[in-house]
Image (tube, rainbow, N blue to C red):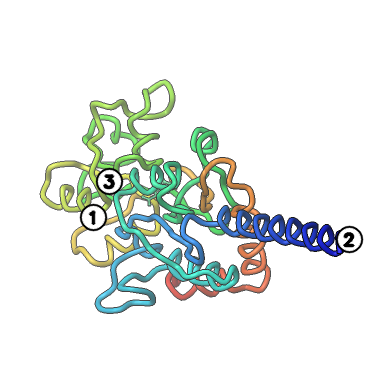
């Protein structure tokens, strides 16, 4: 009888340990069990933008939106998109309000100090949008007023000192999103907009009277990022992403939105 009792006790302890173990594993993968919360700024066509109607997911569409859906599917999680300013989307992941930021996000060493980056899934370049026929060019850009989206690499490079290849803060105005910067250019409040090529092409197509200056400014790698130290989630996202790259899914998503 005693033997049976101790056997039962051991079994009970083992069972509770096992339950505890699996519970904490699941709990640590994402903030809300079963969900994959993506923070983004849906003003960045063709990577993430609001759709007319339902779009591909809850009123959103774009390359990152479709990649997020494919990742969530591979990880057997339900996607949640949280749309906010670009700056806030980066902070959300660092403050535990989102599981990943997927927002045409460029890898940068200083960002890597506060977040953990995935494998790159696309490249982007910074370009300069001007008003068609304007006298603004690559050589006199430093004498002009440039608009950028706050917190973006375009803003960081343009507002850097002249010695570091920028134009100085006094030549740069920051906007909450790219669309507002383009609006300011159309209204004549600024002379140029420095922004990623993807949204630049989209803005030039949808607004008459704009053109993109010849020459790429800087080439960048787009990655998603998770909170620093969230290794388990990053590993799962990375292997899902690598599978989607290897089987051509990422390329076909990109080709759906960017036609050369
Ligand atoms: N690629 C740029 C960056 O990471 C802009 C991204 C964006 O505006 N969504 O800063």
* Left or right, residue 205 beside residue 98: left
Binning the other alpha carbons within 10 Å of mark 1 as few (below 14), some (14 to 19) or many (20 upward) gives: some
Task: Pick the residue in front: 176 or 72.
Answer: 72
SS at circle 1: helix
* Left or right, residue 115 beside residue 138: right
SS at circle 2: helix
Q: Residue at position x 51%, y 44% from top? A: 227
- Where's the N terminus, which quadrant? bottom right
For the residues bearing labels 1 and 3, Cβ distance under 8 angstroms:
no
Residue 254 locus on image (x, y percent): 49, 69
Dividing the picture into quadrants, the one containing residue 16 is: bottom right
Residues under labels 2 and 1: Cα distance? 74 Å
Q: Write down the residue under mark 2.
A: 3
Residue 178 locus on image (x, y percent): 27, 51
Q: Write down the residue under mark 3.
A: 193
Q: Residue at position x 23%, y 57% from top? A: 210
Q: Write down the residue under mark 1.
A: 179
Is residue 250 at least partly visible in the picture? yes
Task: Pick the residue in front: 86 or 93.
Answer: 93
First reached walking from the N terminus: tag 1 or tag 3? 1
Residues under labels 2 and 3: Cα distance? 79 Å
Binning the other alpha carbons within 10 Å of mark 2 as few (below 14), some (14 to 19) or many (20 upward) gives: few
């Amino acid at each position: 009888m005693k033997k049976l009792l101790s056997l039962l006790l051991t079994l009970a302890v083992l069972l509770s340990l096992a339950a505890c173990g699996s519970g904490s594993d699941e709990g640590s993968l994402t903030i809300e069990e079963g969900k994959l919360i993506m923070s983004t700024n849906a003003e960045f066509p063709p990577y993430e933008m609001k759709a007319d109607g339902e779009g591909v997911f809850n009123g959103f569409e774009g390359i990152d939106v479709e990649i997020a859906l494919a990742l969530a599917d591979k990880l057997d999680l339900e996607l949640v998109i949280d749309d906010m300013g670009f700056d806030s989307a980066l902070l959300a992941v660092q403050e535990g309000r989102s599981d990943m930021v997927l927002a045409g996000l460029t890898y940068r060493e200083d960002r890597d100090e506060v977040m953990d980056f995935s494998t790159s899934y696309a490249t982007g370049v910074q370009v300069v949008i001007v008003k068609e026929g304007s006298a603004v060019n690559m050589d006199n850009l430093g004498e002009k007023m440039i608009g950028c989206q706050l917190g973006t690499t375009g803003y960081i490079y343009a507002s850097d000192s002249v010695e570091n290849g920028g134009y100085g803060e006094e030549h740069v105005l920051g906007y909450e999103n790219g669309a507002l910067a383009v609006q300011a250019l159309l209204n004549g409040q600024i002379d140029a907009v420095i922004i990623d090529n993807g949204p630049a092409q989209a803005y030039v197509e949808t607004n008459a009277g704009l053109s993109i200056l010849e020459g790429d400014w800087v080439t960048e790698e787009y990655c998603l990022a998770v909170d620093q130290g969230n290794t388990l989630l990053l590993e799962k996202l990375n292997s899902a992403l690598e599978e989607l790259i290897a089987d051509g899914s990422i390329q076909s998503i990109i080709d759906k939105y960017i036609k050369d």
